[in-house]
Amino acid sequence: KEDATLVEYGAYKIVRHPIYSGIILGAFGWGFLMNNLPTLALAVVLFIFFDIKSRREENALCCKFENYGLYQQRVRKLIPYLY
């Protein structure tokens, strides 16, 4: 979108990719709750997939928004306060 703006409030103030974070944290939570190794393995695969996907997206966002680099320094990518 040509007239897009960088959103830095709400969930985006805590993590840069909140939808991906929710999916990953939900998968890990479900795996631990069910004590199910295949589900935990799926959560790891989802983490790797969304990490790669978000890295590609962020390359484009850095080109589109001048201040995206500062946003990256301030806000974690996928796991609030950790990563």
Image: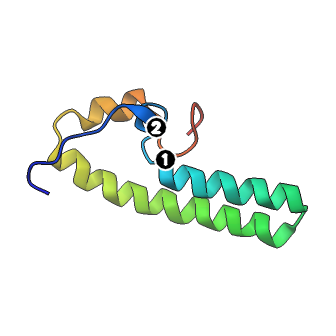
Identify whether 29 is placed above or below 77: below
Residue located farthest toward the right when viewing the structure as drawn: 35
* Rendering coords of residue 49 (x, y %): 53, 66
Residue located farthest toward the front when viewing the structure as drawn: 10
Task: Name the residue type under label 2.
Answer: Ala
Task: Name the residue type under label 1.
Answer: Pro
Quarter that holds the C terminus = top right
Within 10 Å of the Cα at label 1, are there few (<14), some (14-19), or many (20+) other Cα atoms?
some
Identify whether 43 is placed above or below 6: below
Residue 67, by quadrant, is top left
Distance Cα–Cα, label 2 vs label 1: 6 Å
Q: Which mark is residue 18?
A: 1
Task: Assign a secondary structure to mark 2.
Answer: helix
* Rendering coords of residue 34 (x, y %): 88, 62
**Left or right for 45, reference 6:** right
Q: Which mark is residue 11?
A: 2
Quarter that holds the N terminus = bottom left
Which residue is nearer to you in this view: 55 or 10?
Answer: 10
